[in-house]
Image: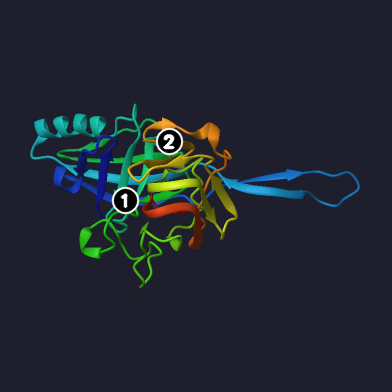
Amino acid sequence: MNTIITTLSGTVYDLEKLGITTREFNPSSPSPRNETEQVDGLHGLVDCGTTYDARIIKCSFYLKAADVPDYYLMRDEVFKLFDSRQPFYITESYNPGKRWLVKTNADYSIDQQWIYGMFDIDFIAFSPFAESIGTTLNPFTFDSDIWQIGEGLIDEVPTYTHKSTSFRIFNAGDETIDPRQFPLRIVYKGASNNLTVTNSTTGDVWKYTGSSASGDTIILDRVRATKNNNSIFGVTNRKLISIAPGWNNFKLSGTSGSFEITFDFRFYFL
């Protein structure tokens, strides 16, 4: 088993190539936070919904140095690799298409045995979900090294760029893409008048009380709405588009002439 570290800046560290072997990579189960309410005169509690807490990923490693002096250099390199002043992504080799955004959750010590070092680290993933390494705008081919079996992908290759007013968007993950919590970027290029984007599956409707020309670009980036990099939030209905797991049926109205709309997001897994 191997572990890959990817920093927020995109630097990749292959632990195996650095002489560090992964013995265990064990995410805890999702930890539910059950919201309840007690009502006088009724038995039990009223279920008000459940969300998930952060998750702990228990990992065990051992390192092998060239000699004793090299061991101390490797020990210090380990401390640098897992520096948690900034979060970083970790990926296990058995799930190469998924990554976790983590920090170390506590201090740890390295047990030296001559040129070997054994150590355990508890990582905390503040999100309970692993995310796909690839986004919907990456090619859906397994030879691209960003997708894997077990990511909910289907035989039909989904399309995330459309030029018609009715289309479907596929979410292969376990979780709804809510732009208040997860990155979601919808880009519309073309002319429009009172553009409306409707997800018939979720019931979400976004409306823009304005117009765009053929060379204009309207972007819904999480909770922000812009046209040509200028905010248009105040002239929208101030709603958001979410994408449920599975197929989502979309409709556009207010389009004019030729246009293109793209959906860019990742998939999230328990």
Residue at 37% across / 45% down in the picture?
100
Q: Which residue is mark 1?
A: 133
Amino acid type of the residue that numbered disc 2 sits on in the rendered structure: Thr
Q: Is residue 59 above or below residue 74?
A: below
Give the left or right position of residue 210, taking residue 258 as reference. Answer: right
- The picture places residue 219, in percent across and down from the top left corner, at 41, 41
* Numbered label attached to residue 180: none
Residue at 50% across / 59% down in the picture?
250
Give the mark toward the camera: 1 or 2: 2
- The picture places residue 35, in percent across and down from the top left corner, at 68, 44
Q: Is residue 87 above or below residue 33?
A: above
- The picture places residue 144, in percent across and down from the top left corner, at 22, 59
Amino acid type of the residue that numbered disc 1 sits on in the rendered structure: Ile
Q: Please say whether residue 171 is visible from this viewpoint.
A: no
- The picture places residue 148, in percent across and down from the top left corner, at 31, 62
* Numbered label attached to residue 226: 2
Which residue is situated farthest in the top direction here?
Answer: 85
Q: CA distance from mark 1 to mark 2?
A: 27 Å
Residue at 32% across / 57% down in the picture?
95
